[in-house]
Amino acid sequence: MQHTIISVRDLKKSYGTFEAVKGISFDVYEGEIFGLLGPNGAGKSTTLEIIETLRDKTSGEILVNGLNLDTDKEQIKKIIGVQLQTSGYYPGLNLVELVDLFSGLYNQPARAKELLHLVNLEDKAKSKYKELSGGQKQRFSIATTLINKPQIVFLDEPTTGLDPQARRNLWDLIRDIRSKGTTVIITTHYMDEAEQLCDRIAIMDEGKIIAIDSPDKLIDDLVETGFERPKQVKSANLEDVFIHLTGKEIREA
């Protein structure tokens, strides 16, 4: 039986008369990669920011590993890691110095070289943050979410703006994080990314969850309605061609 690590019940968030989140309920299971998808303005970022303790809810109940958001907010902060869409780091500090800085903020000892090795940045340990490529900055941002050894990691559009190689390298990193027992919650606008990574996804629109299941089940349900793509699907796509020709290995130095 799967253990529910996040339980959301009848969550609502209003700004004056505007209701951004309209009474949604869902569960996230321990050890899965769970995707929260939707168009801009659907309410997904608001939902995650509430669970992450970054935004107050209007009403509803949220439990994170049995901890109630209303009474145990500080305890919840200790077991989650949050990678925001944009992160600000001191550009003149090198990566070891930044890890040491975050370690002090978390009051959690961290071995910088080991942490950087996990995200394939060990050779950049003495490089300044401003000298990193886009993909390297994203991997470092994820590394900082792991300093406090979280049970749950939230990743907000982690591959936006990355080239195909960097994007797939980040997929491998996310799978590796999950393989170590960490639950991963991800938002993305790339449907192929959600299909490849997520065990289950919830699709939001206009503040409501309109579908929730595994990617395969949602696709099968659509096919059963008689839906057909206007163009025949090939066994590879242009991104596969790009990766095959340019190489998948990390080449972002």
Image (cartoon, rainbow, N blue to C red):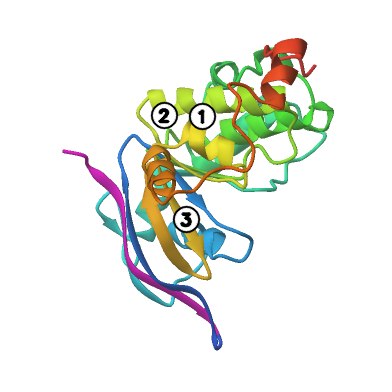
Labels 1 & 3 near each other (Cβ < 8 A) = no
**Label 2, on which residue?**
178
**Label 3, on which residue?**
203
Of badges 1 and 3, the one in the foreground is 3
Pinpoint residue 94: horizontal percent, then vertical percent.
Answer: 75, 26
Total numbered badges shown on the rendered structure: 3
Q: Residues within 10 Å of mark 1 (few under 14, many from 20)?
A: many
| Viewer can see residue 147 | no
Residue 131, quarter of the rendered image:
top right
Labels 1 & 2 near each other (Cβ < 8 A) = yes
Residue drawn at (66%, 37%) of the image:
159
Based on the picture, tell me whether residue 96 belongs to the magenta stretch: no
Residue 248 position (above or below residue 71)? above
| Viewer can see residue 29 | yes
Badge 2 element: helix
- As drawn, the label of residue 174 is 1
Residue 22, quarter of the rendered image:
bottom left
Q: CA distance from mark 3 to mark 2?
A: 21 Å
Badge 1 element: helix
Based on the picture, tell me whether residue 12 belongs to the magenta stretch: yes
Query: Where are the magenta residues, as a range?
Result: 1-15
Kind of residue at badge 2? Arg
Assign the magenta stretch its main secondary structure. strand
Residue drawn at (60%, 59%) of the image:
39
Q: CA distance from mark 1 to mark 2?
A: 6 Å
Q: CA distance from mark 1 to mark 3?
A: 20 Å
Q: Quadrant of the C terminus?
A: top right
Q: Residues within 10 Å of mark 2 (few under 14, many from 20)?
A: some
Of badges 3 and 2, the one in the foreground is 3
Residue drawn at (76%, 11%) of the image:
245
